[in-house]
Image: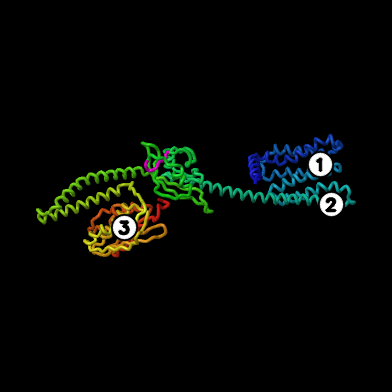
Amino acid sequence: MAVRPSLRGAATYFRKLGPRSQVALCQLPLSLVVSILGLMTPLTWPSLLSSPVYLAGIMLHLLLFVACFVTPWERLRSSAYLVIPVLDLLAIGLLRNGAAPLLPGLAILVVFPVIWLAASGILVRANVVLSTVGPLLIMVPASAVHFPHLTAADLTTLVLFPLMMLAVFLAIRFASANMRVQQRELQALGEELRELLAESRDREKLLITILDATDVAIAAVDRSGRYLVTNNRQRTFRQATGVVDEMPGQGHQLIFGQDRQTMLPPDKRPINRAIAGESFADYLVWAGEEPAQRAYSTAARPLVGEDGQLTGAVVVYNDVTGWVETLAATEELISTVSHEFRTPLNAILGNVDLVLEDTAGLPPDATQRLTVVQRNSERLLALLADLSATASAALKVHPKRTDLASLVESTLNSARAEADRSGVRLAADIPSPLWAYADPLRIGQALDNLVSNAIKYSPDGGVVDISAGTSGNWVQLRVRDTGMGMRTDDAAKVFRRYFRTDSARKAAIPGAGLGLSITKMIVERHGGRVACASDQGKGSTFTVTLPADGPPPSF
């Protein structure tokens, strides 16, 4: 593999030379050998100085080498330079026959012009003849001396040497042809690679343009945490967090938790979680320091190679500072309004309760109107409690080993009066005791919401049934009603804040659409889940799943 680059380098260097230098370079090896031979002749073979044929051969070689430089090859036909190796055959014939029998081995110099003729790749048929006939003619004068008494050695030389040169010519020719084929293939491959490289660069530019045009920060990292691809917004995030190198998972970084003050340890940072193989979404972090601190909702997905091994991860950062601040302002407003409303409502209820304690002196109409005031004031207080609960992003739960059977019994006792007014029958099938890891106050609140909803959405009577069961390390509570039900697409939205179905609004069923969102919040704070299955006109079933013995792994 190391030879090919050097050959390509030599070929590139050769092509950069002019035609005269190229021809001289091809002639140079033979000229060097002949020059050395000429320098050695006076010292080693002084008798050859009296051979005019030998001296003519040396002079012809020198003239040919000079001709390589002085001939304007660029003005002649492309095959004109082949006259040099043809005349080399003549010069070698003069050398060999002028030095015979002292230096019969000079005939081997024929290999230089034969290689040149074979490697030229032009006038192939003529060059085949020259490469065979030329060596034959060089050997004829030495053998003619013995004619007609030719020896076996003479005949062998006359036949074998030209055949050897023919074999050399063919070997060089085939090798040159193969090299040309390989060169064309390499050129085609190189062109294809250049096109692929250009296409890859265009795609890279397009990808970078698309990434920079998005309104979220994106980073792709390898398993060591080194950045592979980023966009402008991600680079802004890096500057805010103090990351200035290519190893985002290392060093001191200004990334804080949801309290905006506690700096996240390295294993809790988004990129470190991602390269550890975690897949997550809506992971809120704060970046930078006050007053320029920003909130980011992060998500990550792993990159997996063809062998199934983790190769890196893609992490997305969405700046949600405005949303978080708006939510905080909304929660503060709701909390303030709830507090301001609750004080006069409590005063109204207190005074109404005092009046209703002694109704002897009141006319029946006044008592009825006060009862309406009392009922609606209690409803407003309940609504304010729901608003406060949904506005609180820090709803606290304190789970412990709790008997759900007793909670269900309390819920049914509290709801019985409402059920009787609506003509709804309450039923329960709960094993006792039924232990779960739950906050009794919060889960009791969730059960109250579910049962109250079931009664409320059964306006024509029916049955509300509570059942329970266990599955592995989980406990399941099911609240089923035979009421009006809802469409499947509404069942998927029912846990959203303020969501109410069209059928509930048309039926003028009171409510603000907060009870189920509060229930979902409470259950998820326990590490559990709540689901709804419903069929319009046939009722709904809500299933609450809670840990049985202790906090789940994700709790």
- Is disc 3 surrounded by few (<14), some (14 to 19) or many (20+) residues within 10 Å? some
* Side (left or right) of 173 relative to 443: right
**Which of the marked residues, 3 or 1, is nearer the chain's N terminus?**
1
Q: Secondary structure at mark 3?
A: helix
Residue kind at label 3, given as amino acid type: Ser
**Which residue is disc 2 drawn over?**
156
**Magenta segment: does it hold 258?**
yes
Badge nearest the viewer, 3 or 2:
3
Q: Secondary structure at mark 2?
A: helix
Marks 3 and 2 sit apart, C-alpha to C-alpha, by 119 Å
**Which residue bears the numbered disc 3?**
406
Number of the front mark, 1 or 2: 2
Q: CA distance from mark 3 to mark 1?
A: 122 Å
Q: Quadrant of the rendered structure where residue 104 is?
A: top right
* Residue 554 locus on image (x, y percent): 41, 51
Tag 3–tag 1 contact (CB < 8 Å): no
Image x and y of residue 70, in percent: 70, 37
CA gap between label 1 and label 2 equals 21 Å
Which tag, 1 or 2, sits closer to the chain's start? 1
Task: Classify residue 22 as left or right of residue 449.
Answer: right
Q: Which residue is mark 1?
A: 95
Magenta residues span: 254-259
Q: Residue at x 31, y 58 (%)?
A: 408
Considering the numbered disc 1 on the image, is that residue within a helix, a strand or a loop?
helix
> Can residue 30 be seen here?
yes
Mark closest to the chain's N terminus, 3 or 2 = 2
Front-most of residues 414 and 95? 414
Identify the residue at image location x=26%, y=53%.
512
Q: Which is in the foreground here, disc 3 or disc 1?
A: 3
Dominant secondary structure of the magenta stretch? loop
**Amino acid type, mark 2:** Thr
Amino acid at dot 1: Leu
